[in-house]
Image (spheres, rainbow, N blue to C red):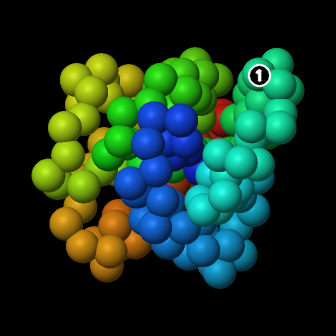
Amino acid sequence: MKIYFAGSIVGGRENAQIYAQIVEYLLAKGHEVPSAHVARPDVLHWEKKNPPSLVYERDIGWVRESEVMIAEVSTPSMGVGYEIATALHLGKPVLCLYRQDSTVSKMILGNTEPNIGVKAYNTPEELLSLIDGFLSGLSNQDLVNSR
């Protein structure tokens, strides 16, 4: 499955280790993650070279091509919020994950769109279990509708 992963880059990198854990887990399960670079420790340096128009076109293209989105939203990010809204607008199933002790935007927590799930986690094991539950809960119809 092609999964778009979203996590804060410019807004802060305090969850980069969690991002890496998520991306590594998805790749190990055989999924394609076009946005895997978000988990790289040097992503700020890497992205600095790219003009904003390239980043926008590339990332929105990846959202369009992906079947689902998984976003780690513990660190507020306007870009991640934009990507989530785009995925929902396109009918993609979205899972937003956040550390239980985080302050998460009420725009995410209060979202009643049918294709979004917002889940808190306390441990890495719980985080991965939430991802497994989301992916196994997708029906073929969900995936057909997201294309």
- How many neighbours does mark 1 have within 10 angstroms: few (below 14), some (14-19), or many (20 or more)? few
Q: Please, is residue 133 above or below residue 112 in the view?
A: below
Q: Nearer the viewer, residue 48 or 9?
A: 48
**At x 24% / y 35%, what residue is drawn?**
104
Q: Residue 145: image x %, image y %? A: 65, 34
The part of the image, by quadrant, that contains residue 64 is: top right
- Give me the residue at 54% from left, 67% from top: 20
Residue type at numbered disc 1: Pro
- Secondary structure under the numbered disc 1 in the rendered image: helix
Residue 11 seen in the figure: yes
Q: Residue at x 83, y 33 (%)?
A: 50
Q: Is residue 8 left or right of residue 30?
A: left
Q: How many marks?
A: 1
Asked if residue 95 lies left or right of residue 144, the reply is left
Residue 47, given in percent of the width and then of the height, sits at: 74, 41
Q: Choose between 63 and 115: the one closer to the eye.
A: 63
**Residue 115 percent location from the top left of the image:** 45, 33
Q: Image quadrant for the N terminus? A: bottom right
Q: Which residue is mark 1?
A: 52
User: From the viewer's perspective, is residue 118 above or below residue 3?
Assistant: above
Q: Quadrant of the C terminus?
A: top right
142 with respect to 123 (left or right)? right
